[in-house]
Amino acid sequence: MKISKTDSIESLIQQITVKSAAAGGIYTWLDNTLKFHTVYLEVQPKQIALDVANEELSRAQQAFSKILARVQILEDCLTEENLKMQRALAEKDDAVRTKERLARQIDLAERLVDGLASSRIIWTKRVETFKNDLETLLGDVLLASTFISYTGYFSRSYRINFVNKWRSAIATTKGVIPMRVDLQPLSIMIDDADIAEWMNQGLPADQTSYENAAILIYCLRWPLMVDPQGQGLRWIKNLFTDKLVTLRYNSKGYLDRVEAAVRRGDTLLLECIEENIDSILEPIINRNLIRKGKIVKFGDKEIDYHPNFRLIMQTRLANPHFRPEIQAQTTLINFSTTRDGLEAQLLAEIVAVERPDLEKSKFEVTKQQNEYKINLKKLEDSLLARLATAEGNFIQNVELVVTLERTVNTSLEIEQKKIEAEKFSQQIDRTRELYRPTAIRACIIYFIINDLSKIHPMYQFSLKAFRSVFLKAIDYAEQSEDLRIRIDNLIDAITFASYSYIVRGLFEEHKLIFTIQLLLQILTEKGEIDMVELDLLLRNPQEAHAGSPVEFLNEKAWGSIKALSLLQIFHGLDRDIETSSKRWKKYVESEAPELEKPPGEWKSKSTMQHLCILRAVRPDRMLYALKLFIAEKLGKKYIESRTPDFSRTYEESSKSIPMFFILSPGVDPLKEVETLGKKLGYTSQAGKFYNISLGQGQEIVAENALEISAKEGHWIVLQNIHLVRHWLPILERKLERILETGQENFRLFMSAEPSADFSTHVIPQGILENSIKITNESHTGKN
């Protein structure tokens, strides 16, 4: 067998095995032994090294175990220290948070204290006031309740008198009923914010109106407003706005709407009620509830009564006479215009014409002042409410304190603006006050006019009509750069325009009464009349059983002279007449003694004193003397008899201001209407003029003609409306609508015979007071 060097061991073993299996096995063993030896030679040092390494490893592991044990101890210490550190850090964080929280609370507390500092004095005083009020609460509430219940219908002077008497009556209890000595009933019911809000709603700015509003709000019996000028009505509508259901008494279907209002719980305003109220309303007025207060009788049926239902009644009658039971079941409140309220309104109107910029500023400032008062009250109430309802320590309530701070800051800002507005208002008022004499004069005239209805029922004049005359007079007044002269011109124009407007609607016998009343009121306001002398002139007192020592004076005249002589200003008059009888006889028996002055030292006396003497000795010449007095003080134009120019009177009329002719025997004023209508193109031939004489079923014809005339701008004459008494309330209601919605050229003329007897007077107040009244009497030759 040939063996090559290049053959591998495996190949060689294979070849040997082929030749000899035993040799192959020996050779395999030798090969493995050689390989083992070779491997052993490599492994043995490594084994030795391994054993050495294992020994070193064991020693290292032992050392490592010791180190691990120490590390564990150190880690345990570290963990404990970490826990301590964490606890320390937590305590530190708690301390920091506490510090920050306390700092915030201190800051909030300081801010709150600073913010409330301005209110502290006020609230401290109020707390003291409230404590005192609690002690006198019984008497205070008793007085206020009495005031609400019983004074509503009376004027301001009567109310003051009543309150003083009630105070005295309560004082007689000697402390059993404690009461504040200086208590004003109004102060218990309302505050400045309430008044400010009412003024923004149109309530006149006078004390009586404030009291009326408070009574209406707080009275338990349904309020019944006596409101001839409609001022209370306007305020009520603004007060309740869309929450108010307004009905006119006796209007078509009004009872159905009353029933619906009672069921729904509406606030119902029943306006223009009459003296005789429908008995069907009495259970509602008197609140006669049945079935545990849930049902009320209404006519022949029973209806649900809503607990929120409220009734307010209003009448335009100036001096109504309601049945006693109605007066007992309601709270009467007199909303008639007061002198102070009207004066303020007229001043505003004249300044609005003369200085519109000034009045606009005044209006805006007044409105701002009222809003400031309202907002201040709301903010203060909100502030107190938040403080009162805060739970726990409210200083910790950041939102609450911030809100309170904001409220206080807002209050301070508003208070500052309020002060600034008041200063500005005072500046405006100084200029406005220059025009006050014109408002005072107009106010005097209006209240004289308003009292004319006491003389004759036909003399009804509305405030609206008077305002129209007032504003037109301002336009007619002569202009002047000098404000004082301009104001004098305004006063003269307003006086004469009002005089002219009124006297054309008065009978001759009443014209002098109106004029002298006008003069006396003007002189009284100026302080030019001694009230004692005026009383003497009006009453003409007489000493009884005074025999006359002179033949030219009768016993009655001498009695008057003796009564005058008792006064210092006329001391010695009786002796002078006796000792200077010739001079006095000449004066007394003069044809016109009013043109002369009394003899002797009595010449130097005032005109009023001369009138007192003249009335005592020659009362038959007083009418002429009064005319001269009027001419001296007001001017001759106030005593000149003149026939009104109808065309000029027509210019004062409008679609909403009819003309009313007060008929006299033998006079046909409607001829002037026809003549003027023909001149202006309003004739029956052209279909633009309707002349209807009422009576005999002409009411429907008149209603149709009214509708057509108002719509198309025609003229219509309604003659003798006094003959259709039953139809006049319908006419009044119809005119309220037509006069507002009619076409601009529409004109209405009415005529009626007067009735001096109030019991037989039939013409509705609404028709008379809104019309231009004209009397046409046949001249009798009287001076």
Image (cartoon, grey):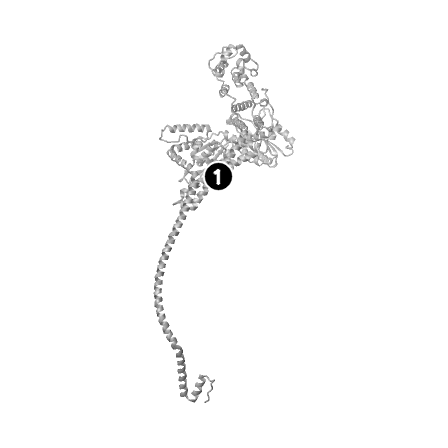
x, y percentage for residue 472?
A: 58, 30
> Would residue 665 appear left or right of 122 to someone viewing this image?
right
| Residue matched to label 1 | 414
Quadrant of residue 286 within the rendered picture: top left
> Would residue 93 appear left or right of 430 to someone viewing this image?
left
x, y percentage for residue 235?
A: 50, 35
x, y percentage for residue 621?
A: 55, 17
Identify the element where label 1 is drawn.
helix
**Image vertical order of residue 612 relative to residue 725, above or below:** above
Which sits in the foreground, 260 or 220? 220
Q: Is residue 569 visible?
A: yes
**Image vertical order of residue 54 relative to residue 167, above or below:** below
Quadrant of residue 593 within the rendered picture: top right
**Image vertical order of residue 260 relative to residue 572, above or below:** below
Number of dots carrying numbers: 1
Q: Is residue 304 visible?
A: no
Characterize the local packing of mark 1: few (<14), some (14-19) or many (20 or more) Cα atoms within 10 angstroms: some
Name the quarter where the C terminus is drawn.
Answer: top right
- Residue type, numbered disc 1: Ile
x, y percentage for residue 246?
A: 50, 38
Name the quarter where the N terminus is drawn.
Answer: bottom left
